[in-house]
Image (spheres, rainbow, N blue to C red):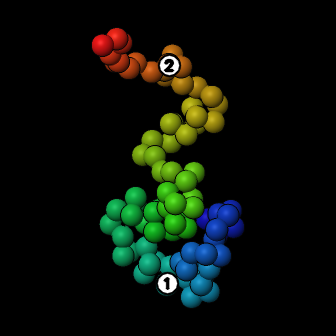
Amino acid sequence: MRNYYLWSDQVPYLSEQKYNGKDSLNALLNRYSDPNNLFTDLLYQYKVIDKWSFIVDDSKVIDNWIQGISETMGYDFMLARIGT
């Protein structure tokens, strides 16, 4: 993530040299029991500045997204009241 993330120099875990070593990196990773929390802590101002990063549980979702495969018909269902 350090090499590809746009704001990596703004995230201490990605920019600090002390996390270059295997032991210190493992110590950091072992602090997290939930991968979602680790992911969001590695983002720069998640949902404020970085509105585009996301994590999914199923890699097939990403594969389908990249290939343009959707399981919807391209429209959403919505109820509305017309008139008075």
Q: Position of residue 65 (x, y in %)?
A: 58, 34
Q: Is residue 74 above or below residue 47?
A: above
The label nearer to you, 2 versus 1, is: 2
Q: Position of residue 12 (x, y in %)?
A: 55, 80
Dot 2 lies on which element?
Answer: loop
Residue 27: quadrant of the picture: bottom left
Instruction: Name the residue located 63 percent from the left edge and 71 percent from the top edge.
Output: 8
Instruction: Name the residue located 64 percent from the left edge and 68 percent from the top edge.
Output: 7
Outermost residue toward the bottom?
18
**Sooner in the amino-acid sequence: mark 2 or mark 1:** 1
Q: In this orientation, does residue 21 appear?
A: no
Q: In this orientation, does residue 10 appear?
A: yes
Q: Which mark is residue 75?
A: 2
Q: Position of residue 81 (x, y in %)?
A: 32, 16
Q: Is residue 79 above or below residue 28?
A: above
Closer to the camera in the image, 55 or 83:
83
Closer to the camera in the image, 27 or 47:
47
Q: Position of residue 38 (x, y in %)?
A: 43, 66
Question: Image quadrant for the C terminus?
Answer: top left
Residue that mark 1 sits on: 23
Q: Name the residue type under label 2.
A: Tyr
Closer to the camera in the image, 4 or 9:
9
Instruction: Name the residue located 39 percent from the left edge and 64 percent from the top edge.
Output: 37
